[in-house]
Amino acid sequence: MEIIMSVAIGFLFMAAVYLMLSKSLIRIIIGTGLLSHGAHLLLLTMGGLGGNSPPVVADGVSISDYADPLPQALILTAIVISFAVTSFFLVLAYRSYQELGTDNMDLLRGTEDHE
Amino acid sequence: MSNLLLFPIIIPLFFAVILMIFPKRLKLQRIFAVIGAGVTLISAIVLLAKVDADGVQAVTLGSWPAPFGISMVSDPLSALLVVTSSIITLFVVFYSFPSIGVKREQSYYYPAVLFLMVGVNGAFTTGDIFNLFVFVEVLLMASYTLIVHGGEKPQLRESIKYLLVNIISSALFVAAVAFLYSVTGTLNMADLAVKIPQIEETGILTVIAVMFLVVFGFKAAIFPLYFWLPGSYYAPPIPILALFGALLTKVGVYAIMRTYTLFFTMNVGFTHELLGIIAILTILAGCVGALAYFDVKKIIIYNIIIAVGVILFGIAQLNQPGVDGSIFYLLHDMLIKAALFFLVGIVAVLFGTTDLRKMGGLIKTYPVLGWTYLVAAFGLAGIPPLSGFPGKLLIVQGGFEGPQFWGSIVILATSLIVLLSAVRIFIYAFWGEPVETVPLKGSVFNQMFIPTVILVAITVVFGVGAELFMPFISGAGEVLLNPSIYIDAVLKE
């Protein structure tokens, strides 16, 4: 299972990098979304996938066969944060498109009074 | 166990939330912003006194035992940084009154500043690496708001890049935390410091250490990850720029300081040498930029990068003078950068431009401004007895005692370039043929100038009275060099 997850994470990172290297702003935003998905899955996988094991240590459950609940708490926090940042990025992109009249990163270079 | 160390985080949060209720009431906004920042400063000073008297303070939230709950730790270093960042925020709020513009003030400017304070103070105080990520996100979110605040075209264009760079570095942060957790099974910094020396396989930990260096390097603007900084910091207005220049990169620097002294010490020969080399390259890259531009804002912005390199070089030496010097220089740099941005802000307002070639002769009309700038510029370059001197002296001494003595030579040589870049502003803007200035009301000028002068005076006191502050600094350095003090404070309550 960990192998499949690792391949999926690698693919997400690859797709994210590909998208973020394009010129169109909306593709870049989708790329950042995929990048954070990849990072979150990595967090989950690195904590060890518990399978059916219970997440608490109780009677009859020893330390060796319980699923670590901490990565899930971490991933939840990270998801909330990346959701907020992505929505801010979308609003920013829309506003910039209105003000600057383009979503092409090539045209968003430098400053006007650049020497 | 004391909850005191949470006040510098909770108080600005509380005031920021209150301020969001009535964005249009200008007077109330200003009053509450000052009260919020002021009360935070007072609580930070009380905290510093407590840490100085009783040693490292730690509290683990929710009354969980230490490695399981989220620990907040206030050692002398973090208390000093919280005090300094609170001072700067308070002065930035004062400086914003005349300079930021009523329209911005009525659009949630002060709440954003206070939220930034929450994130910065939290990042300085936290004792948990994932919680550090959360607080960094809090301060980044506030900084996204501030960098685009006002929505001018350059701001929009630059904030897209700023946002993108920080999203990538945050994703890497999460990935690095994931690797660290899978290797050590803990995220509490004190617990990490206990567990990491027990792991025999140091290769993977070295990789993780370098990953964290990349993550924090994005925030701290080290070579070669500083590329986003000059463009992004150039866009927002001066008070926001001062806040960013004084606080944001320093959070990255602090995170490197903390992780590279507390637990990533298993392979010093590689990681710290790498850090030292990167620090020197950062200084050189910053020097090139500081000399290349004729723009007052750009010159000071590149000086931020130089200072980051100087501080990190001291940490990389990992000996007592180097670390003490880094802490001293870090505090000095936060204060002096804010003061310099304030000063060039006034100069830019007076001339209506930031281009040095269109300035001149200000010393005849505003002599006090000129001499204040000169004092600040000398402080930046580290001319004794001003505040840049003791820190740099100790860092250079640390370099000569360590293996990277050539780095100390570079720092000494580049001090001259720093001096040249700062004095160049003085020569162009204050000497020479007078250029017509934009008429500025005396009261507005005073409102901008008084906080600036006080801040410069603080840096002078910090430099001249260095002996007075050295006990605090060496106390902070002692905790960094002896992780057992930190560990005991967190794990044995």
Image (tube, coloured by chain):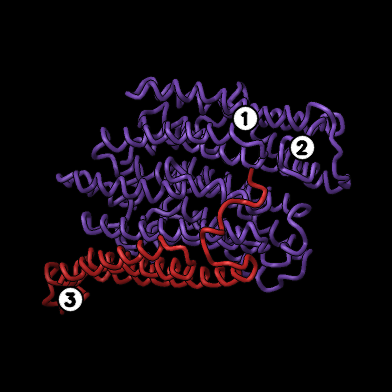
Query: Given this view, does label 1 or label 2 mark the residue nearer the observer?
Result: 2
Q: Amino acid at mark 3?
A: Ala
Q: Secondary structure at mark 2?
A: helix
Q: Amino acid at mark 2?
A: Lys
Residue B421: mark in rendering: 1
Circles 1 and 2 on the same subunit: yes
Circles 3 and 2 on the same subunit: no
Task: Count up the numbered dots.
Answer: 3
**Which one is in front, B55 or B117?**
B117
Label 2 marks a residue whose chain is: B
Label 1 marks a residue whose chain is: B
- Rendered-image quadrant of the N terminus of chain B: bottom left
Query: Given this view, does label 1 or label 3 mark the residue nearer the observer?
Result: 1
Q: Colour of chain B?
A: purple
Write down which chain is painted red. Answer: A
Q: Residue at point 60% right, 21% down?
A: B384
Task: Give the mark nearer the N terminus: 1 vs 2.
Answer: 2
Gap in angstroms between the C-alphas marked 3 and 2: 75 Å
Q: Amino acid at mark 1?
A: Ser
Please say if B167 is above or below B303.
below
**Residue at mark 2:** B358
**Residue at mark 3:** A58
- Across and down, in percent, residue B102 comes to 77, 62
Q: Is residue B51 visible?
A: yes
Q: Secondary structure at mark 3?
A: loop
- Across and down, in percent, residue B395 comes to 45, 27
Gap in angstroms between the C-alphas marked 1 and 3: 66 Å
